[in-house]
Every structure is written in structure tokens, then in C-alpha cells.
Amino acid sequence: MTTATASPVLQLLEDRWDHARAATLDEPELLRYRSNLLGSDLRITNFAGGNTSSKIVETDPLTGEPVEVLWVKGSGGDLGSIRRTGFATLYQEKLVALERQYAGPNAEIATEDEMAAMYPLCAFRNNPVAASIDTPLHGFLPFPHVDHLHPDWGIALAASANGKAKMEEFNREFGHALVWLPWQRPGFELSLMMKRAVKENPGCDGIVLGGHGLFTWGQTQRECYMNTLTTIDQLGQFIARHSRGKVRFGGEATPARADREKLAAQIAPFLRGRISARHRFIASFSDASDVLEFVDSADAKQLAFLGTSCPDHFIRTKIRPLFVPWAAHEGLDALKRQIDCSLAEYRDQYRAYYKAFATRDSPALRDASPAVVLIPGMGMFSFGKNKTEARITGEFYTNAIHVMEGASVLGEGEVKGPLPQCAPGMDPASFRVHTNYVALPAGEAFRIEYWPLEEAKLRRQPPEKELSRRVALVVGGASGIGREVARLAAERGAHVFVADRNAEGAAQVAMELAAVNSAEFASCSPVDVRSRESIRAVLDAAALQFGGIDILINTAALFPATTDGAIPDAMWDETLAVNVTANYLLADEAAALFEEQGLHGNIVFTSSANAVVAKRGSEAYDVSKAALSHLIRELAVRLAPNVRVNGISPATVVKGSTMFGRDRVRASLEKYNIPFQESFSDEELRSRLAAFYAERTLTNKAIDPADCAEAILFLASPRARCTTGHVIPVDGGLTEAFQR
């Protein structure tokens, strides 16, 4: 772990450079190290945002001569986690020679996109890592080491109506020589603008890209790192000085509700369902203090409509979020009406935005639903194809909030004349301003959001899995069949919420699932399936975590056993409560959530071969499973057509089952005259019993939890879209259980 070093210059950030560690690294590893340090603090740059580079002398494998190689973060990489293999490497001489091929921004040939297609031809050592569109921005700067970052404080300056004047004030106050460039979409043209700016301003120590971000550099890796940290830290100090005594965002207009988390859990399924009209999305919720300060403010609606500024932001957040008006005295029914009304308006505006700027070569219209939803008094919902993307989208909009705040506090009255972000040839009226914050023109936003090069990046992403975008609530998931279902669902892309009476066991399984996908894709909670209130609490927790559920699976059951074989009335009642009534309660509560979502749902319960096989001594269990099998059919009828309800009917599953403790296994072995020794481990005893049960089937195979999990997830998957009201045997061919 890197230890922060005290610095007399830095007041807000930390110098995390470890000199002893850095001394052991070669230049590419120093670039990786520098990048990881910069990416470790979201105040410096956002996830997957920004680029770092180094120009390193290496031996050309073709000539054996020394040659300068540009190492630059590859397309789609993240500075905080990038490794040496994540950098694109290009012959520096070949890259800068491309200037001769470039005919300019308005030429009919040799466009910026065509220039990007030339970068692979410059690759050093046949490196397959895709070079990003920012590659020439690094290559054309005459410095060995370059950082291009999107710190909130830097973008706040870049997105201020008085940004250029404030940059000059900052230069005077802190002894910098930053240079301002107006807005220009990242690419080859911007790289030449930066090259000219450095040539025309000798001694400059950084570039502020209007509406975009910050470039800094250095002669060594360490110098570059410290120049970047110092500049960003001092920008933070500069904005903090301007913010003293100022009211943020026009002050509070709607007070935050004390029960906002509870209300968020209740509205989440409704909102998720409406957002997921075209594709299912996973939700993330935030009521962080900075989010609430913004969404509850007087300026929130107008600033939200303006949209974001930095390209890295609106690629994730779209051109703007959805702001849903909700008065302090209104309830959830009023909020639902506002969501429907506001969402319809948002989609109409988004389609109009696409129609206004799309060309024949533009990618097809994407989902018109928002990625971010702001609700005053409650907080922010953000959406993505998985939990990580949903969270990151929310983080990006939180960055945008900080940018709007910083730009607002830098304001000192109305700015006269053209905005500094407006480049020659651009329409000044296309830039919109509120409280000194300048949003990117809609046309420029479209050129980023629907850029074919960005589309190509999206297409390089791996295909989604069968259960991607779905949330599975696995009740009884701490052990046995439930644990195997949770694991297999995670492998197939599902987000899994594990619920069990054994809270510690549920938490352990959730931890195991983190190794399958991501820790963010799994969560857990204790549950008492006999209690409607407990079930509701679990559904609320899943809704707050992921936005709702798509699949309900219950494997929890009770097998009553006593030393003399007699079942007391209380045990009989408990067996039916857990094995029958609990399933009804689960389905009834889940049905209400499914109805709120308006999305197709799936329920799979676990019955038993005992439901049709009459045996001595297990009447309570057998009767409860027979009732459950019919309950499945009843629920299928009741919840059709939007919810499919099915079940599996396994023969005895000994492995991993909490119903087969050592005493019960021993009793069964004695009952069937199967020899064993007291020294045998629990697993050895279970194996003997499982082998005995297997011999009674047509396949002679012991039923494994994985066999049951496969059947359950088949029924829960789109592959079984026409199957409902059925109970599938998973019994190895148990002839006694054949339906007559």
C-alpha cells in the first residue's frame, strides 16, 4: 500500500509517490505506476477517464537502432487499474508524420476518423492494444511525459463562462502559465491546435481545454506526476476561495425527506420498469450529501436540463439526466405520475435531439431512456447494464454536479461577448449558460455520443451472458441447492441477492460470488420466510441494491425429525408454514414487485419426489411438498401472463443439505441397514447414503445440488419462455415418482 508523503505545496490532494518503489521500475512500469497513482483518487480523474503517456527510447526490432516509442493508455482502459499490457505503443516518428496526410477539419478526404484508422499502422512491436482517439494529443506535444485528466476542479474552470479570465487570474495567483483553448472535439485537429498553442506560448506549463479538461506534463515521470497534482490541487484551492460565503445552486428548494431510503426502495421497481422499456437495466441509488444538495436546490432543474460538459461525462450520463419534479408534500402515487409524464417528455426530446443531428453515417438511435434520474427530496438513481456501470454512471453525474458547483462559484456577474469555449466558426448561440456554467452545445454532444469511433468501442465489448441484466433473489441460498443456484446464476451473468435464515452463511455465499463476477453483483440479507414483514424487507433491500428483481427462487425447506418418529402438532404446523405458506408469502410479495416493474418475472420453487411417493414416517414433509406442487400450478394461473411459475421435484439430495445433519444421516443408514463406522466423517456418511439412494433410480446417479440448480435456472431462463405451471423431476429416474 502506497504511503502518502507530506507536501508543503499540496493542501487538498496527497503525494502518494513511493521513491523506493519507483527506483526499482523501468520507464514503462513507471508510466504504469504514475497512472495507477493518478487513477486512485476520483478527485483527480474519473473511472476510465483521461490518458497518460510517455515517450520512451527502445530498440527497434527491425533495425536494431534506438527509436522513440509513444506509450499511451489504450482505448477503454482505466488509469487506476491499468497494467503494462494496457498501453498502446506507437512509433513516435510515424505518428507525427501523419500530419502530412491530414487535410484539415473541413476537407472532404482524410477526416479525423480516417486518421484514427492509421494509428494501428504505427504500432510498435505489433502491439494489438487499440490506440484511443486521444493518442495524437499526446504525440504532438513536445514533452516526454504527459497527463490528460478530467478533475472536477479543472473542468469547472473549463466549463465557466468566464473560464479564460479566471484561468489568467489563477496563473497570476499561483505562478502558472496555463494556456486556454476553445472547445474542439478530441482528435487529430485538437492535437494540432495544442501543438501550435505550445509553440506560440513558450514556457507554458499546461493547457485548459474549454469545456473538456486539463493537460499537464514534465521532463521526468516524477516531475509530470507532481506538476499534475500541484496544478489540480491549486485549482481546488482557487475554487474553494471563490466559494466562501456563497450559497450553492441557489439554495434549498425541496427539503430532503427523512425516510428517503425507504421511499427509494419502494419507488425503485416502478422506476426500473419504466426505464427498462427497451432493455433491462440495473439501478444504483445515491443520497450522498453532495447529490442531495444539488437535487434539492432551486437551480437543479435548469442546470440538469442544460446537460453535462466534459465528453467523458455525457458518454456515460447521456446529454442530460431526467429531473422528476416532486413536491415536499406529495406521496409516491404522485411521484409515479410525475415519472411517467417526465419520462415520456424526455424520450420525445431525446428522439428529437437524435433526429436534429443524425447524419447518414450516424449509428442507429439508441435507447431513448435516461441513464440518470434525479428526484428532489430523495436523491439520484443511475442505470447501467450491470451494477458497476450503474454506479459509475452515478459517479460521473456526481462529478458533473461538482463541475456545475465549481463553475457557479467562479461566476462574478454576466459575461459579455462570446464565450471562451466558443471556437471560431461555431455558433455562439449554441452554448447555453446558467449561473456561469456552460454546457456543451447539443450538436457537439451528439458528435461525441454518436461518434462512430465510440460506437466501435462499444462493439468491442464482450457479448452479454444469458442472465445479464437480471436480478435473482435466491432464498435458502446459504447452502445446498440454493448455494449452487446462486453460484450458477452468477456465472451466467445474473446479479444475485442471497437470503437465508443463516445470515452468516448467506454472507459467506455472497463473498464467494464476488470471485465469479464482482462483489457489486452480489448482496445478502437474513430472512424469516414465515414472516411477510421479513420477506418485504428483503425485497426492499434487493430493490435498493439493484432496482428490483427478475427471478425469485426458493430452495429453503424443513424436514421434521424426532427420535421416536412421532411428529408433534407444533412441528406439523411449522413444516407446513415453512414448506407451503412461506412459498405463498414469497410469491405474493414478489408478485406485487413484479407488477410495479411491469417486466416479465420468473418464480421457481423446490418441491420433492416425496410429493407423489407415499412413505412411512415423513407424512408432514410429503404432504407439504404435495401442497407446494399444486401451489405452483395455482400461482401460474393467478400470475399469468407476466410471471411464469415453475418448480423442480428432486429426489433426495444429501450433499450439502442442512436437512441431512449427522444424526439424521446415521438414522437413515441404520434404517436401511447400510454399514458405517462412527469414525466416518460427515461427508463419508452422506456419500454412503447418497449411493444407496442412487441405486434405486434408473440412472444409478446420486442427485447433486448442481443437477437441481441446472433445472432451476433453465426454468428461470428465456429458454423456457413457454413453460409455466410445471414441476420438472430431477430424481435420476425414480420409478416410484412417475406420474400416474
Image (cartoon, rainbow, N blue to C red):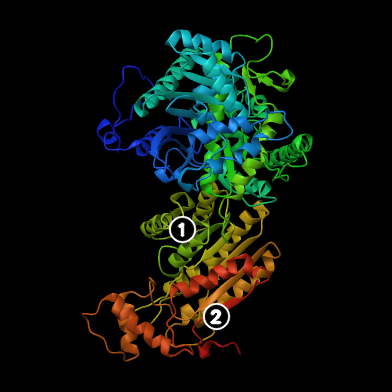
Residue nearer the viewer, 411 or 143: 143
Judge left or right: residue 29 versus residue 430: left
Q: Residue at x 63, y 29 (%)?
A: 185
- Can you tell which quarter of the image residue 588 is in? bottom right
- In this orientation, does residue 153 appear? yes
**Which residue matches tag 2?**
729
Measured as percent of width and height from the top left, residue 560 is found at: 41, 75
**Residue shown at 40% from the left, 66% from the top:** 479
Which numbered disc, 2 or 1, marks the residue that appears first in the sequence? 1
Which type of secondary structure does the marked residue at label 2 adopt? strand
Which of the 4 image quarters holds residue 297?
A: top right
Disc 1, SS: strand
- The residue where tag 1 is placed is 498
Q: Position of residue 531 (x, y in %)?
A: 49, 59
Looking at numbered disc 1 in the image, what kind of residue is underneath it? Val
Report x, y in % for residue 233.
42, 21
Image quarter of the N terminus: top left
Whether residue 296 appears in this view of the structure is no
Instruction: Name the image quarter holding the C terminus.
Output: bottom right
Question: Callout 1: 10 Å neighbours few (<14), some, many (20+)?
Answer: many
